[in-house]
Amino acid sequence: MENQQPKLLKTLAHLVSFILHPLFIPTYFFLYLMQVVPFEFASITDWQLKLKLFSVFWLTAFFPAFAVFLLWRLKFSDSIFLKTQKDRIIPYVIVMFFYWWMYYLSRNFTDQPLALKYFYFGIFIASAIGLTANHFIKVSLHAMGVSGLLTAVLLVSFYYPINNLPWVLLSVCIAGLVWSARMIVSDHTNKELVLGFAIGMGTQLAGFLWVS
């Protein structure tokens, strides 16, 4: 399927897949919360807020990505793109640790929005379920990430009295864009994409019910 697509389309699909990589989703969600519920961060200074944003990126994107790079360089994985189920086992465990740590911090600090608490718990559970499912099927991590983001944004609407519709529509567009991109440049089947989408959505709902 991939070879039948025009080169420009495949290039754009690769770009979308990189920009909206699952590792960046927590950072994007934090940025979103900074825009829609700034009153949740009223107890901290702008500098402290920027440090929090940096720490989210550092712990949920940079460190896991660097760990994957090291695994590849040390020959523990065949590809930095984690193309096989075997390559994904250790990275799953790594992100599980960081996501659990972020949830632990958000649960024990009072200056954290509730939305962050259920979001972190949700992505932690999603990574655990993804690791289990990985023994049987190569779940789409991109689908899991964008469906989790979409669901988390939707759930914000139920907790905060804000006009969240533009952000919900944007999240729907992002989910559709990523789905299309993965259909073009990945070897995932429809079943793997649907399963990833279901895991991302279901775990955010579970996280919301658990935390709230």
Image (cartoon, grey):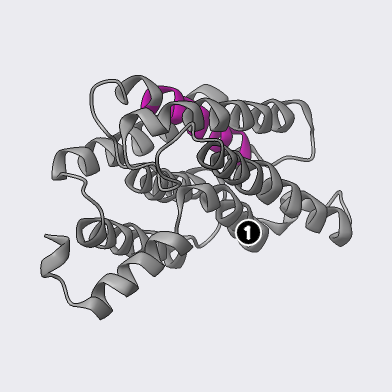
Q: Work out whether 69 lies above or below 86.
A: below
Q: Work out whether 54 lies above or below 115.
A: below
Q: Position of residue 106 (x, y in %)?
A: 70, 33
Q: Residues within 10 Å of mark 1 (few under 14, many from 20)?
A: few
Q: Is residue 181 left or right of residue 22?
A: left
Amino acid identity at mark 1: Leu
Q: Is residue 144 magenta?
A: no
> Can residue 206 be seen from the camera position used here?
no
Q: Position of residue 61 (x, y in %)?
A: 60, 47
Which residue matches tag 1?
Answer: 31
Q: Secondary structure at mark 1?
A: helix
What is the span of residues highlighted in magenta in the rendered image?
116-130
Q: Work out whether 123 lies above or below 136.
A: below
Dominant secondary structure (helix, strand or loop) of the stretch shown in magenta = helix
Q: Is residue 106 left or right of residue 2?
A: right
User: What residue sits 55% from the left and 33% below the top?
Assistant: 95
Q: Nearer the viewer, residue 149 or 186?
A: 186
Q: Is residue 170 left or right of residue 189?
A: right
Q: Nearer the viewer, residue 159 or 124?
A: 124
Q: Is residue 127 magenta?
A: yes
| Image-quadrant location for residue 78 | top left
| Image quarter in which the N terminus is found | bottom left
User: What residue sits 49% from the left and 27% below the top?
Assistant: 90
